[in-house]
Amino acid sequence: MGKREEMIKRVHDLMPQREKIRNIGVVAHIDHGKTTLSDNLIAGAGMMSEELAGKQLVLDFHKDEQERGITINAGNISIVENYEGEDYLINLIDTPGHVDFSGEVTRAMRAVDGVIVVVCAVEGVMPQTETVLRQALKEKVKPVLFINKVDRLLTELQLGPKEVGDRFTKIIAKVNNLIQKYAPEEFKDEWKVNPADGSVAFGSAYHNWALSVPYMRKSGIGFKEVYEYIRNDDQKTLAKKSPLHKVVLEMVIKHLPNPAEAQKYRIPKIWTGDVNTPIGQAMLNCDPNGPLVFMTTYVIVDPHAGVVVTGRVFSGKLKPGEKVYLINAGVQNTIQQVGVYMGPERLNVDEVEAGNIASVIGLKDAYSGETVSTEKIEPFEPIKHFSEPVVTKSIEAKNPADLPKLIEILRLVAKEDPNLKVEINEETGEHLISGMGELHLEIVENRIKTEKGLDIVTSQPIVVYRETVLGESPIIEGKSPNKHNKFYIKVEPLEDGVWEALTHEDITNKDLKNPKELAKKLQELGMDADQSKRIWDIYNDNILVDMTKGVQYLNETKELIIQGFREAMDRGPLAHEKVTKVKVILTDAKLHEDAVHRGPAQVLPAVRNPIYAGMLQAKAVLLEPKQKLFINVPQELMGAVTKDIQGRRGQIIDMQQEDEVIEIIAKVPVSEMFGFAGDIRSATQGKALWSTEYLGYEKLPDELQMKIIAEVRKRKGLNPEPPKANDFME
C-alpha cells in the first residue's frame, strides 16, 4: 500500500472516533504565514515533499491565488498525526487574511471548534488579527497562538535574546487582551494562551521549525540552540530536530477540543432550536445515531460534478441516496456522493459521521449557511459577517447574445460567494455586483472571464449608501387607494445603543420569539419601556413598533403592514438606497371590516407612503460607508501619507511610533479609497504597509448630500430631484 493509500485508510478509520478528531482553522492578518504553516502540517503528514513545504502553497490552488500570492478561498484538508502513540484526525481549513475575503473566515469558523492564530513576530498583532480572532470567539471557537517568522527577528532586526523575549511577551499580552475582550463570558480566563502550558508556539513556517515549552522539555532544544542554528545559517537541521508540524499539532491535540466536547457549548450558541428536544440533544452529544444535521459553510460549482457543498456534520450520518430537507430554501434534495478533502482532491467515502467536515454532491439548491437535515428542524443561526458589501459595479456581457449565459453565471457566482451581492434587474437590464472592496470585485470579474469563459464589460466602481433620519416626524395619515383603510404612522431615529446592538447582531429578529427578554434588552439600551414591549418587526437594523390600542382586524392585517414596512426599508425615498437606524411607529389604524378591501394592493401603499413622507419630514439624509485605515510607514514618509489621507476626506484618529516606524490610523470614506493602493505605493516608494477594516456607516457631509443624491438617482434612472413629503401625502 502506497503512502497516500495508507493515509486515506487512516483518515477513514478515524472518522467515527470523535474524541480523536480536531476540526481546526488557521487564521491571521494577511501575509503572516497561514498558508505556509498549513503546507508544513500537510508535509509533516507525508502528503507533499518537505522541501516544498512553505513554497508550494498546496491550499492556494486557484490560479488567481497563485498569481497574487494571497489566499482568497478557504481550503480544506484532512490529515492524520500520531501523538504519544495514538492517531488523531485533523480536519484543517486554511482561511484568507485579506479584509475583502473576511466572509470566508466567518463561514469557516462555523465548521471548526478551534483555531491556530498566526501572528508575525516582526509586525505583531495587526488589525485583521483582531478581526479574525473576534470572528472565531463570537462562534465559540477556541484559539491557540503560533508566533511566526521568529528567524527574521534575529537575521533582519538583529535583536538580542532579551528584546526577542519582550517582543513575544507583548504579542501574547495583546492576544490575551483580545480574548478577554471578545471571548464568551465563561471562557474569558480559561481560553487565554500561555507559553508555559504549550498553548503558544514559536517558529518559522518558511523554514519548517517550531518550539513550544513542552516540546523544549522533550527535545532539549531551547532558544539558545535556536540562536546558534540561525546564526550558522542552518535552519534545516533545526527543522529536523524540532519539526514545525510536530510542535504545532501537539499544541492542537492537547489544547483544542474534540467535536463531542465543543458541540456541548457551541450548539446553544449557533442553533436557533430548543436543545432539550431529541434533535437538540443529538447535536449536543454529537450523536452519530441521531437524525442527520449538516450545515453548509462553502459552496463551489464544479464544471464536472455540479454543485459541491462543504460543511460540518453535527449529528447523524451523511450517506449517498438519502433524501434531505434544505431548511432555508424549503426544498428537498438527494445526496449523491459524500467525501472528505485532501487539498484540491475530493475522496468519496461510504458515509461521514457526526463531528466531521465533509463534502457533498447533490445539494443543488444549497447556499452557504444552509441547514440540511432528514427532518424539518429549526435552522442554524445565520452566519454574521463583520463587514458588508459596500462597492458596486454594473456588469454586462460583451456580446449581447451572451446575456442568458451571464445571468446563469452570476447566479452561480452568488451561490459560491455569499459575500457577493448580485442584483439582476429584469426591467432595466442592469446587472449589479456588490463586494467588500475593489480587490473582491476584481477577483470575481477575473473568475467570470477565465474560469467561466465569458467576456464581460464592467463599469467604474460605485459606492452603496444608506438612508436614515435625524429628527422626528409628526403623525402622518396613509390612505389605501380605495380610501377604506387608514394608517397613522410616525418616524424617528432609533436610539444609538439599540442601533449598535442591531448592527452587531446582539439583537435579531429571532429575539421576537421572547418578547419579555427583548423588552428588557431594549430598555437597557435606552428605548422607551412601552415601545420596547410592542415590537412587531426588526429588519435591516430598523424597528417597527405597534402603539395602537384596540384596532379591529389589525392582527389579520399585521403581515401586510410588516411587508409594507420592509419594502420601505429596502428602498428609501431619497435615492432608493436601503434604510437604516429608523424606528417606524404605528400609532393608530382604521380598517375595513371586509378582508377583500384590505388586500396587498390596498395596504402596502397605505403603509409605505406615510413612512416615506415621515422620513422626508424627519430630515432624511444619506449615510456613507467608512473604512478604518492602518498604515505603517517610515518616519520620513509620514508627511506624504497624511497628505494623501487628508486629500481623501480622511480623518487621522491616532499615530503611534515604534522605533523608526509610524503607525497611522485614519478613517476614510470608501468612495475616496479607489486608486489608493497605487497612489500610496508611489508616494512611499512601496515602503508603506497598509490594511483596512470595515467601519460601518456615517452621515455624508451636508455640502455633499444633494450632489450625491442627484448622482445616485440619475444612475438609477430616476428624476435627479428627490421627492418632497407632499408627494407621498394625499
Image (cartoon, rainbow, N blue to C red):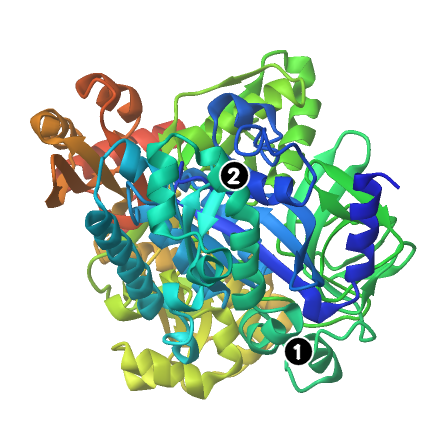
Label 1 SS: helix
Which residue is the site of mark 2?
35
- Report the side of 631 relative to 715 (left or right): left
Q: Position of residue 245 (x, y in %)?
A: 56, 48
Measured in 3D between alpha carbons, the distance from the residue under mark 1 to the one under mark 2, in whole angstroms, is 32 Å
725 sits to left or right of 14: left
Position of the N terminus, as image quadrant, is: top right
* Amino acid carrying mark 2 in the image: Thr
Comparing 584 with 36, the one in front is 36
Kindly identify the amino acid type of the residue bearing the numbered disc 1.
Leu
Q: How many numbered marks does the figure carry? A: 2
Sequence order check, earlier mark of 1 and 2: 2
Looking at the image, can residue 194 be seen? Answer: no
Quick one: quadrant of the C terminus? Answer: bottom left
Q: Residue at x 22, y 24 (%)?
A: 687
Quick check: 500 left or right of 591? left
Name the residue tied to disc 1. Answer: 284
Q: Position of residue 84 (x, y in %)?
A: 65, 64
Residue at position x 52%, y 39% in the image: 35
